[in-house]
Image (tube, rainbow, N blue to C red):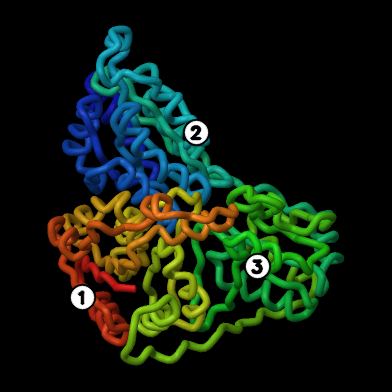
Amino acid sequence: MKDQKTMNGAESVVRSLHGAGVDVCFANPGTSEMQFVDALDRTGLMRCVLALFEGVATGAADGYARMANRPAVTLLHLAPGLANAGANMHNARKAKAPMVNLVGDHAVRHRGYDAPLSADVEGAAAPFSDWVKTATSPETFAADAMEALGAAMSRPNKVATLIAPADIGWDAGGVVAPPPAAPEYAALDDGALDKAAGMLGPETVLLVSGRVLETPEAVAQLQGIAAQTGAKVLAPTSNRRFERGAGRAAISKVPYPINMALETLKPYKRAILIETVPPVAFFAYPDRPSLLLPEGCEIVTLTGRDGDGPAAVAALAERLAAKPLIASDPLPPAPQIGAITAATIAAAIANALPENAIVVDESITGGKDVWRMTEGAAPHSWISLTGGAIGDGIPMSVGAAVACPDRPVLTLQADGSAMYTLQGLWSQAREGLNVTTLIFANRTYEILKTELFAVGANPGRSALDMLDLDRPNLDFVALAKGMGVPGRRVEDVAELQRAIAAAMEEPGPYLIEAMM
């Protein structure tokens, strides 16, 4: 390793991140990041995955973190590139997924000249980051990177953005910094445990998220608690990751549609929160509340997002002497020859899913039945859209496949949101990732039509034209082929099941356009 006098700031950051366990970089670099490109090349310490759009890089880092349980680093270019990356930084932030972003900026001596790409990088980072800092010297650059990594790995996990002026990266004087201290969970409050245990009953709902849903043993303990006390267990609409399928206890989610969510939560007078917060509606609607729990509902937080949810569940189960319970729905019958609908595509997926698969879900309305019908499918991991900013499905599948190269990935992808980050298919092809992308081709933004009616509109042709994906129709098989991903279009649901199963058995990426 070079000594302090000859190592530049960029190399000290790369070496420090690698020493702390970060070994993947999702990159879309520009001129102000060339010192990092050089350092990554010379050191050979990280796997570098090129994205053709910044939102693919951050979406991939999100998917990677959810499956690897540690952050990757992204390499982004100035404020405009960071702005392109922002939507999937937002999704990661809402998921509490750890992410470290390195964002280049103009050299300090160049900032005063209002060059074409000059902008407020810190200002662009702030809305989508939990932690933001600008490096000021090569000597402290690596220490700043370790501070960013520490913030990303803290409880709960965070999105950290470190801004790197070009000269801070290329100037000599870089010093390798030690890894940050290991994060600690907030202590379990015995008073909250006592209160939660006393609240349980048929009019109580346990709302759980975070690491609880990633721990099958904790979910089984929750279902045992529910069976013993009559309480109901629910997850929020959006969650970072689920471990689910046959042999694992099932949990229903609070529905997305406002009326269904209110009806689901209406019976409960008491709520116990574990690694989550009180549920709120995605949007404001006329004559509907923002808070989804009934007015006057007594709420107790057993452990917050900074706590150890599985440990809290175990303590509650021990207090009640509740035994784990595993019960899930059976696998639905395989679909017969016929049209592809929301119900039949769900049955096809459930029957085609191999054991130990990763499902990346951005199916939106076309996949409304998939969650329920896959409860009895082969055991699998499930990651999905969290922040509501569409365009994360294809990028997240890139990151998930990089994190778990021995596991097949199935992306359930709505056609409208696929177009936001379709470039991620190219990254799948270049990296040879085992990802099967299933396009739900209903040729419309169906979710927005639902929202239009939800606010009381009576849409005419002009409104509907803004929500339909026709004239011309999108050809996803051709689009995928242009980025190096083979594919096929399917119109029969029985054939669809066979196509999914076959694609997931083969290495490398594949796209299936399911005509709904």
The residue drawn where x is 25% and y is 80% is: 499
Amino acid beneath label 1: Glu
Percent of width and height locating residue 144: 43, 27
Say which residue appears at 36% left-offset and 20% top-offset. 119
Three-letter amino acid code at the position of disc 3: Leu
The reply to whether residue 64 is visible in this rendering is no
Query: Image check: 174 left or right of 316?
Result: left
Crowding at dot 3, Cα within 10 Å, few <14 / some 14-19 / many 20+, comes out as some
Vertical relation: 191 (above or below) 13 = below
| Disc sitting over residue 486 in the figure | none
- The one nearer the camera, 174 or 465, is 465
Residue 201 quadrant: bottom right
Sequence-wise, which precedes: disc 3 or disc 2?
2
Residue displayed at 28% across by 23% down: 169
Q: Is residue 391 above or below residue 314?
A: above
Rendered location of residue 211, percent (x, y): 57, 59
* Screen quadrant of the C terminus: bottom left
Query: Disc 1 to disc 3, how far (Cα)?
Result: 36 Å
Secondary structure, mark 2, is helix
Distance from the alpha carbon under mark 2 to that under mark 1: 41 Å
Q: Are marks 3 and 2 in contact (CB under 8 Å)?
A: no
Lower position in the chain sequence, tag 2 or tag 1: 2
The percent position of residue 111, horizontal first and vertical second, equals 31, 12
Q: Residue at x 60, y 63 (%)?
A: 212
Residue highlighted by disc 3: 234
Q: Which disc number belongs to residue 506?
A: 1
Q: Badge 2 is on which residue?
A: 127
Q: Is residue 101 above or below residue 466?
A: above
Secondary structure at badge 3 equals strand
